[in-house]
Image (spheres, rainbow, N blue to C red):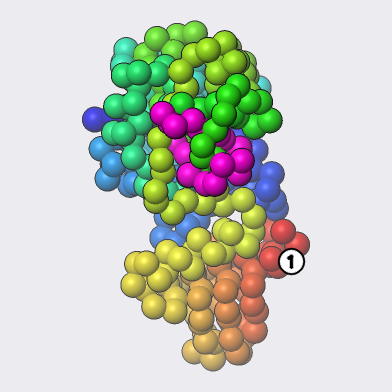
Amino acid sequence: MIQTMFLCAGLGTRLLPLTRELPKPMVPLGDRPMLGHLLDALEAAGGRPRAVNTHHLPEEISSYISSYNSSIHISHEDELLGTAGGVFSARDAFERAPLVVWNADILTRPRISALIHALECAPLVLSVELLAAGQGNVGLDADGRIVRLRQRSIGKEVSGGAYVGILALGADAVDVLPTRGCLIGDVAIPWMEQGARIVGIAHDSPWSDVGSLRAYVDENIRWLRQGGHGAHWIGPAATVASTVELRSVVVGAGATIGGTGLLERVIVWPHAHCAAPLANAVVTPEAGIVHLGLG
């Protein structure tokens, strides 16, 4: 089983106002928090969660992780340490072995075995969606070596790419991470420029960073369709008036929907309340109705 750390300490500003109530990894996606889907995807890929870090609304993540598996280390950051600093701070939780690091807002099914295998010839391996040369934030040469990251380049690329927010580190690489800083800007780019062999592994599965309210609603509707739930899903103890029609709607546990008419493309969080008609919105217990146009 491949040890993995989920990076959960971000502020989730792109999903405001939703993330005033819950940290981004804990926003509801279908029948469970987004983090629950990541844990399932990790298990399916042959991985084992060893650590998560927290900062914003930490008790929400800590409670969920503890109920899922009490052996997972929770590394709380009073001040944000960055992606590299977060991994370094949690290093005592890891075995001396390769480590997969997964941004906890990335919904996908990664090739973690391929990432680990590539560490045989590189200290750091990125999961990359391949694009045409010059496109995206990554460039690779003919051997799969990364020669461009962001705006920094060290050689001729034959393929561009988009970094999907999942990488692997060799055991020795974990030990030399900075106490604060970014895995890309403060580790991968300097190592690349110093001549270290940084490798990109092709990521061939759909992925999303849930970077907007609209993307969040889209991911919930995708969950409906892929799970065979039809036009809607209604959680336990939720109530929907008989005068309401649901179309592409997720209703969380204990939520209440009244009124008359159509609810379409609406995500109702657990214990939230709203009334039809309503379209293109997220409904939360504290913020109430959040229209997509505001995001």
Q: Nearer the viewer, residue 204 or 92?
A: 204
Q: Quadrant of residue 69?
A: top left
Q: Nearer the viewer, residue 169 or 223?
A: 169
Left or right: 163 with respect to 108?
right
At a point 40% along the width and 9% down the height, the residue shown is: 172
* Relative image position of residue 180 (x, y in whole percent): 62, 16
In the rendered image, which quarter contains the C terminus? bottom right
Amino acid type at image mark 1: Gly
* Relative image position of residue 112 (x, y in whole percent): 33, 35
Relative vertical location of residue 83 with respect to residue 64 in this rendering, above or below:
above
* Relative image position of residue 194 (x, y in whole percent): 57, 11
| Secondary structure state at the residue bearing disc 1 | helix
Q: Is any atom of residue 27 visible in this view?
A: yes
In the rendered image, which quarter contains the N terminus? top left
Which residue is denoted by mark 1 in the rendering?
Answer: 293
Residue 242 on the magenta segment: no
At a point 41% along the width and 40% down the height, the residue shown is: 202
At a point 65% along the width and 51% down the height, the residue shown is: 15
* Relative image position of residue 228 (x, y in whole percent): 33, 72
At a point 44% along the width and 13% down the height, the residue shown is: 173
